[in-house]
Amino acid sequence: MEETKYNTKMRKLLLLFALLTTWVAMAQEPVSFTVQQKQVSPTEVDVVFTAKIAPGWHVYSTGLPNDGPISATLTTEKAEGAQPAGKLTPKGKEISQFDELFGMKLRFFENNVTFVQKYKITGENYNIKGFLEYGACNDQNCLPPTQVEFDFKGNGPKEAKKETADKAATEKKETKEEPAAEEKPVVTGDSLKTDSLLKTDSVATNLADVEKGDGASLWQPVVKELSALNGDEGTHNRSLFYIFLMGLLGGLVALFTPCVWPIIPMTVSFFLKRAKDNRQKGIRDAITYGISIVVIYLTLGLAITGIFGASALNALSTNAVFNLFFCLLLVVFALSFFGWFELTLPSSWSNKVDSKASTTSGLLSIFLMAFTLALVSFSCTGPIIGFLLVDFATSGNFWGPAIGMLGFAIALALPFTLFALFPTWLKSAPKSGGWMNIIKVTLGFIELAFALKFFSVADLAYGWRLLDREVFLCLWIVIFGALGLYLIGKLKFQSDWEGGEMEKPMPVVCIMLGLVSLAFALYMVPGLWGAPCKAVSAFAPPMYTQDFNLNTKEVRAAYTNYEEGMAAARAAGKPVMVDFTGFGCVNCRKMEAAVWTDPSVADRLTKDYVLISLFVDDKTPLPEHIQVTEADGTQRTLRTIGDKWSYLQRYKFGFNAQPFYVLLDNEGHPLTRSFVYKENVGEYMDFLNEGLEKYRNK
């Protein structure tokens, strides 16, 4: 029996390991290409590139305008006995979508795509060699221009004259002997876009020279150091601790609602009656009751985690459909708290559980009593639990729902247990009254405000532009202004009439909180004209969505060369921020428009750091092609400056997507965790401040 259990556990662990391995592989290789040649006729051959694209990613089509993202292009480096016929042709379900940031229609493919390049065979034998270059992005990152190389040989038509091939070979030999007459590679699918690119001096240093002498430490890999900083256990624990505290706070708020607080005296009196004859039994029952509440809500959190899984929970934070659903859900919860209707579970459920608890005995009866509490109090706890689960599920932490529900359950169960153990405390507890309705209505305003945050995610994803930054701030100003008026007694709801509290003055605590809410609403008003409003930057849409913005300050890097920037930083005694970016990187432009334009971020970047922007899609050719070996052992040819910076990112930092920000000291070692695409000014400032503090401490 034990062996069977052990084998079952091992199988589960192996399955989990396989799933994690698959997930990691997908995360590292979102686009996978295979290439083959197909003989169409004796005089024609097709080079076929077939791509499998991971969910959420897309590969751009051919022929995009020069100032757009990376188009798919094909470069023919060698064509002996053959020549390209026509342009690179994409095949698949092409999606066309207008992008306001680039001001053009972008065409791309999802799930899969095939690119075909035809070659006309002109000799008895042929040898074609070259590479396909493509760009790929998802909602958060973009890959650097990635190349898929090919080198095919074959036989042409039998009737072809051999002298054709000999002539081609002779011409090639003469070309080698006469460098001035060397032909440029044939590029199909799009132009090289070199005219509009930022030029850099001395960037194209050969890697062999860079990795010797003074440049050795600058190129030294720091993958393990950066991985340790990104996976810092303390940060992870703080995140879980925050979720636990949020659950605890939610449980305390639920405790003071009209559906829960009045039940406490009845429950405590029940346990006191059972404890008359046996005090120890009463204490045991009270503790069992509290533990049962914890088990019920913890099971709910674990169920959410088990149903969705780790990768799905991470995806929820950016999934437009789920965010739209969460928005509607929170609006329903808010209207329920305002008193428009009441969310209740079928009464037959609670009646059945209650009768079952009465007819059973022992620990089961206590557990069923706790389950009855969960069902009866659902009209008040349901919206709070729903709001918390939405927040926990989109936190990006696998254990978020379980840890959050643990905090919620402890806060809810502790008073029942303590009052049962110490019944005299119940006399000093506040009596039920209209103050509980005030808590409900206040929660309604808060849930309505957070609903807009989830709608904003969907709005940005689909490009509706219904909730631009100024519209979002207007709505939040109205919501928190109304909340302030309610808390100072100038706005009333129907439930206030029903509670008999209409004519009574608001408590001092409510008035003070109301003034804080009104002040918060006024604080957001300058944001309508472009003020950063740091307190809401994590919730409001990015700055670039604002139509009228008086804050037009832009930040541009002083250096676009890694070695030059590092040398300047050493001379100035400043830390470095390396920005791996691209001319065609949509999310890089979003970060620059939404985060870098914030005055505090701009001030920190320009005064306290040396900013180096490395464009991984810079098509400026290197003086000489450079052969490098990737981490997986594959050989790769670096042909352009962009190839070099892309290789630096992979080789030194172990990352391959943009935008990617890393803070370095003057020796090229990371100061703190890296930062990727996240339009959150507060978190970006924390990132910069943390790196600056580490540099100064060094």
Image (cartoon, helix red, strand yellow):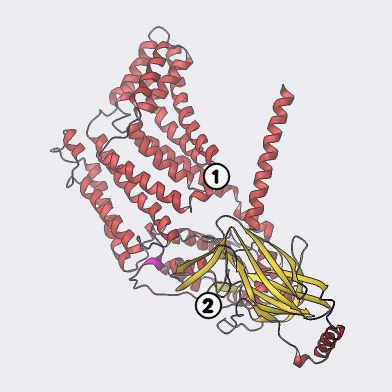
Look at the image and say whether residue 119 sits in the magenta stretch: no
Residue 673 rendering spot, x and y as whole percentages: 58, 58
Q: In which quadrant will I find the C terminus? A: bottom right
Against 472, is 18 above or below?
Answer: above
Tell me, yes or no, if residue 46 can be seen here. Answer: yes
Q: Position of residue 73 (x, y in %)?
A: 63, 74
Residue 395 x/y as whole percent: 49, 48
Specify start and end residues of the magenta stretch as a single range. 540-559
- Which kind of residue does numbered mark 1 sit on? Asn
x%, y% of residue 655? Answer: 64, 61
Furthest residue toward left: 503
Image point (40%, 51%), residue name: 324
* Callout 1 crowding tier (Cα within 10 Å): few <14, some 14–19, many ≥20: few
Q: What is the chief secondary structure element of the magenta stretch?
A: loop
On screen, residue 600 versus residue 131, left or right, reads left
Query: Local crowd at mark 2 within 10 Å, few (<14), some, or many (≥20)?
Result: some
Tell me the number on the disc at residue 65.
2
Q: Mark 1 or 2, which is nearer the eye?
A: 2
Tell me what residue is drawn at x 60 percent, y 82 percent: 194
Q: Secondary structure at mark 2?
A: loop
Q: In the rendered image, which residue does mark 1 sit on? A: 237
Element type at mark 1: helix
Q: Give the residue type that dot 2 points to.
A: Pro
User: Which of the image's four quarters has the N terminus?
Assistant: top right
Q: Is residue 362 above or below residue 667?
A: above
Seen at 44% across and 24% down, the residue is 290
Which circle's residue, 1 or 2, is located before the other in the chain? 2
